[in-house]
């Protein structure tokens, strides 16, 4: 059956239009650059704020521990009324027997304190002495715990940064693919209109119309999938930035790929020093060492300078005030091996922490090597995609020329157009994959 020249010309014109670079659709909302998104995430991300609060909490714990090195004040006051009279009995001569007066008191004497308002006060001020070196080592262990909390917050920050980059690149990729598919939909809609017309005129067979309709539905479905993917990524990015999920914004195009010139060895060395996982393990090992040295030595007493005061109000006979300045010693000569067992347990903890440092360093090197190879593979994929795109465009040009010369069918043009669209999508995806791999490498190296 003879093909309509009008249909061939229309197809050629539409395909030529499609072969041009698509015009970027204007998205609602202000432009959000990647750098601005990273800054917002570092400032506003709720998970990061919670991690930083943990570091602040560790600061308060350290401040509380330091108070143990200062004098301890303990004041206790009991006030009330006796439930029954309080009798103090003194036998004859309790205070001595004198030649001139005889025994004092001469007979047994009872002094009674009747129920009334009374008060008893005990106050102690204790300054640790021999405990100070041990407390100093314990203070260092607590300070290392604060440093661990800081590194944990830094690890979460690196994770958030990597997630922001990945989501941002995903949005760019999905929107670029959606724009390419939108061009395809416009072409298929025009082809469907022309094909339906020529089917009615019995110029083409009905299978041509079915083929065009199937292609149109496929493109519309892919647009729906890409729109949902972009929406999901936008909502997740807004959540990471602590903004409302529906806040609109535009994204900037991906930059051209530029391979990082950092060597694998340099990346490994940097990661071994800067990765929070390794730093945390080292801090924990150091903390375990100080904790071991801060354990009380078995058989050694704790000696403190002490000032004690006692006061009694409302009592007969008892002195009103009493105070003593001296030394307070607390000693547990026999503990059935408890403190020795505690020290051995902490020594085992130290050995475990040292092993964890070695393991963490090895895992970090494995991660860096894997990310480094992934970046190289993604970069090497880019010229392959570009070559495929150039080949697809050349096939489209040849197919278009043949349509104009009545040397080919419109279906061949559609297939060539589809390959061009797919090649454009593949190149955009490869570029996004490269930058995603680069972001993972930067996370692995602990780059900010």
Image: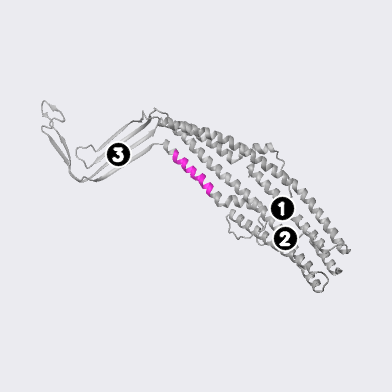
Residue closest to the eye, 274 or 132: 274
Q: Position of residue 206 (x, y in %)?
A: 78, 69
- Residue 124, placed above or below residue 191: above
Quarter in which the C terminus is drawn: top right
- Residue 193, placed above or below residue 395: below
Q: Where does the magenta region start and end? A: 50-65
Considering the numbered disc 2 on the image, is that residue within a helix, a strand or a loop? Answer: helix
Considering the numbered disc 1 on the image, is that residue within a helix, a strand or a loop? Answer: helix
Q: Which disc number belongs to residue 122?
A: 3
Q: Is residue 447 visible?
A: no
Question: How many other residues sit within 10 Å of disc 2, few (<14), some (14-19) or many (≥20)?
Answer: some
Residue of label 2: 179
Q: CA distance from mark 3 to mark 1?
A: 78 Å
Q: Position of residue 123 (x, y in %)?
A: 32, 38
In this rendering, would 347 be left or right of 110?
right
Residue of label 1: 429
CB of mark 2 within 8 Å of CB of mark 1? no
* Magenta-colored stretch includes residue 388: no
- Residue at screen point 15% across, 38% down: 111
In this view, which residue lies farthest toward the bottom?
Answer: 201
Tell me which label, 2 or 1, sits earlier in the chain.
2
Tell me which label, 3 or 1, sits earlier in the chain.
3
């Amino acid at each position: 059956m003879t093909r309509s020249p009008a249909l061939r010309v229309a197809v050629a014109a539409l395909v030529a239009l499609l072969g041009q670079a698509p015009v970027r659709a204007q998205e609602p909302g202000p432009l959000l650059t990647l750098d601005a998104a990273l800054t917002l995430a570092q400032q506003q991300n709720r998970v990061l704020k919670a991690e930083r609060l943990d570091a602040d909490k560790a600061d308060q714990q350290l401040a509380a521990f330091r108070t143990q090195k200062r004098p301890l004040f303990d004041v206790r006051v009991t006030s009330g009324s006796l439930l029954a009279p309080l009798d103090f009995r003194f036998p004859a001569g309790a205070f001595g027997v004198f030649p001139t007066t005889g025994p004092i008191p001469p007979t047994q004497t009872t002094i009674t304190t009747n129920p009334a308002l009374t008060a008893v006060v005990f106050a102690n001020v204790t300054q640790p002495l021999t405990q100070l070196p041990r407390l100093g080592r314990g203070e260092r262990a607590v300070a290392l715990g604060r440093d661990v909390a800081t590194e944990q917050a830094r690890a979460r920050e690196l994770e958030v940064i990597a997630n922001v980059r990945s989501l941002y690149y995903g949005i760019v990729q999905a929107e670029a693919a959606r724009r390419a598919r939108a061009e395809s939909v416009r072409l298929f809609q025009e082809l469907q209109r022309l094909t339906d017309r020529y089917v009615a005129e019995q110029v083409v067979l009905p299978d041509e119309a079915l083929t065009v309709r199937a292609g149109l539905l496929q493109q519309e479905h892919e647009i729906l999938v890409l729109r949902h993917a972009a929406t999901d990524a936008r909502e997740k990015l807004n959540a990471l930035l602590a903004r409302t999920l529906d806040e609109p914004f535009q994204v900037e195009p991906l930059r051209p790929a530029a391979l990082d010139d950092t060597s694998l060895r340099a990346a490994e060395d940097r990661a071994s020093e800067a990765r929070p996982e390794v730093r945390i393990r080292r801090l924990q090992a150091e903390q375990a060492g100080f904790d071991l040295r801060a354990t009380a030595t078995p058989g050694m007493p704790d000696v403190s300078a002490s000032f004690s005061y006692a006061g009694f109000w409302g009592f007969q006979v008892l002195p009103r005030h009493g105070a003593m300045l001296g030394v307070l010693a607390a000693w547990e000569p026999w503990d059935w091996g408890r403190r020795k067992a505690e020290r051995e347990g902490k020594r085992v903890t130290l050995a475990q922490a040292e092993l964890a440092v070695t393991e963490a360093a090895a895992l970090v090197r494995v991660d860096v090597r894997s990310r480094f190879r992934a970046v190289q593979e993604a970069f090497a994929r880019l010229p392959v995609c570009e070559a495929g795109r150039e080949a697809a465009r050349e096939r489209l040009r040849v197919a278009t020329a043949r349509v104009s010369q009545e040397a080919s069918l419109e279906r061949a043009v559609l297939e060539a157009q589809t390959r061009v669209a797919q090649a454009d999508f593949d190149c955009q995806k490869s570029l996004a994959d490269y930058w995603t791999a680069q972001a993972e490498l930067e996370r692995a190296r602990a780059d900010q």
